[in-house]
Image (spheres, helix red, strand yellow):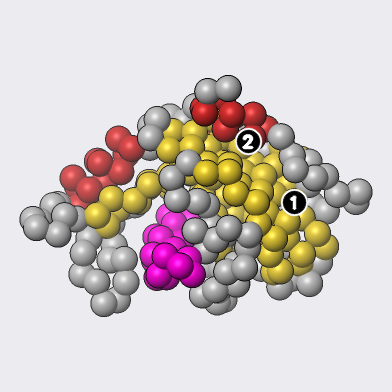
Amino acid sequence: MPFKLFVVAALVLTIARPAAAQTAPLIPPNKPVAGVSQEEWSKRWWRWALSFDDEDSPVADPDGRYCASGQDGPVWFLAGTYGTARTVRTCHVPAGKTLFFPLVNYVTFEPDDEDESCVSLKQRAARLTPKPDALVLEVNGKRFTGLEAHRQATRRCFHPSDEDDTLAAGNGFYVALGPLKKGRYTLNFGGILPELSQAVTYTLDVE
């Protein structure tokens, strides 16, 4: 089976459906979360994801062991994957958190050896995230639609960390779910772009 078809199949199959379906509201993309725009949360997500060494990164996490790393405040980030990978993780999340995570996304950085304008960085990020071939979000067997509206593109470029003055710009499709009530949730999510495909499953025990 060609890899893209395999990823499509992985995106639409649920690993396990719980006996009692717990719901998690999908927040509209233009609605702030904890008083902060989702465009700003997308930048904070990148700063979180880029704050780890490779060996303990939630993005490279094989099974969910690093899910709680660097989490703080009312929003709980979930990680996608590096490159094109099928990933299954298990995670414990405190009740009352709102999840924020990318279905599929990209970030562009200013080159080390030359300056690049913020406009150029945003244009490169946009070219890397054209209309996707597929976007999937499923929570406890409930499939969500209209995910193309959840694009978040950097309006102002940002620095990857307080110590790094490199400029960066992000673009992609992000969702916010919650706040979460106690229970078990199975999330399947991902997307397909020309240069990147990802399919991720999380089993979340919310306590």
Residue 11 lies, in percent from the top left, at 63, 35
Residue at the spot of label 2 = 11
- Looking at the picture, does residue 123 appear above or below residue 207? above
Q: Are marks 1 and 2 in contact (CB under 8 Å)?
A: no
Residue at the spot of label 1 = 186
Kindly identify the amino acid type of the residue bearing the numbered disc 2: Leu
Residue at screen point 65% across, 57% down: 89
- Looking at the picture, does residue 10 appear above or below residue 35? above
Q: Is residue 26 rendered to the left or right of residue 149?
A: right
Quadrant of res 112: bottom left
Residue 151 lies, in percent from the top left, at 46, 42
Residue at screen point 47% across, 31% down: 132
Residue 133 lies, in percent from the top left, at 49, 27
Q: Can residue 40 be seen in this snapshot? A: no
Q: Is residue 49 magenta?
A: yes
Nearest the camera: 95 or 58?
58
Q: Quadrant of the N terminus?
A: top right
Q: Quadrant of the C terminus?
A: bottom right
User: Disc 1 on helix, strand or loop?
Assistant: strand
Q: Is residue 71 rendered to the left or right of residue 194?
A: right
Residue at screen point 41% across, 60% down: 46
Q: Can residue 16 be seen in this snapshot? A: yes
